[in-house]
Amino acid sequence: MPHSKKKRHAIAKHMEELDRTVSRLQVIARKVNQNAETLTVPIALGELRKSYSMKHRALSQAELDAAEDFRRVPIEPDRPLVIYGQDGGLIAYRISLNDEGLLATLTLTIQDLPKRTNLKFRGIDRGEYSTRHYCLWCPYAKVPFVSRELREDGEAGLEFLKENAELWKRLSDILGGIAPNVYKAFLRYPLPNSKERFCTAWAGCSC
């Protein structure tokens, strides 16, 4: 809890602005999701959170065999898909942006990025495809820092983030409409040392 009256006032004002933004985004989301396909899977979101681990685990043969029984839901460009756990927790949300301009910009700017080879993660080879993590990172440090890939790609990486700013805003607006508490949690506190989130609500992206 900040001791400064000025800081307390600034935080309260910021939260009021977030509440107003979320209220507006939820109105839009309700209209967009009127015809959404809704699925409920037989597992609670809470159970998924309990079983999550950052430690890599190889899938058992039984789990691999069960993959044949997965339900595949066809993509309908004009119909969102919402997946809930049996406890009502939101597990997944899929929607088509239906914006050729945003998608074309994303494709072209990815093609213009410097070529990379994947770094191994704790000795695990992640494959031959090219991937980058452009973000502020803070899982093992007290202060957020810029990811290694963005530091190495420098201006090219920053230009990619800038060129796709409208995409990050659109995705953040969608998040605010369907998961308002997550949206507010992402944006509740300012980052230290005047750092800014690279992708609106998100601190970064993978590409």
Image (cartoon, rainbow, N blue to C red):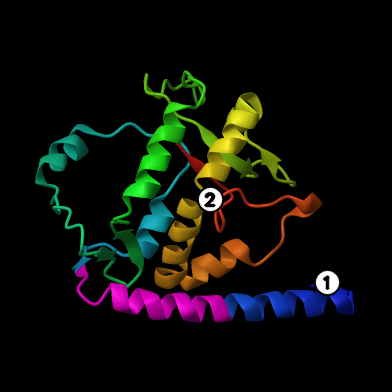
Q: Is residue 203 left or right of residue 47?
A: right
User: Which residue is painted at 53% across and 35% down in the image?
Assistant: 133
Q: What secondary structure do most residues of the magenta stretch adopt? A: helix
Residue type beneath disc 2: Ala
Q: Which residue is mark 1?
A: 2
Q: Quadrant of the C terminus?
A: top left
What residue is shown at x 39% (from left), y 48% (from top)?
102
In-image side of 192 versus 170 (left or right) = right
Badge 2 is on which residue? 165
Rate crowding at label 1 as few (under 14), some (14 to 19) or many (20 or more) other CA atoms within 10 Å: few
Q: Which residues are magenta?
A: 20-37
Secondary element under disc 2, as helix, strand or loop, is helix
Of labels 1 and 2, earlier in sequence is: 1
Amino acid type at image mark 1: Pro
User: Where, quadrant-wise, is the N terminus in this rendering?
Assistant: bottom right
Seen from this angle, which residue lies furthest right?
4
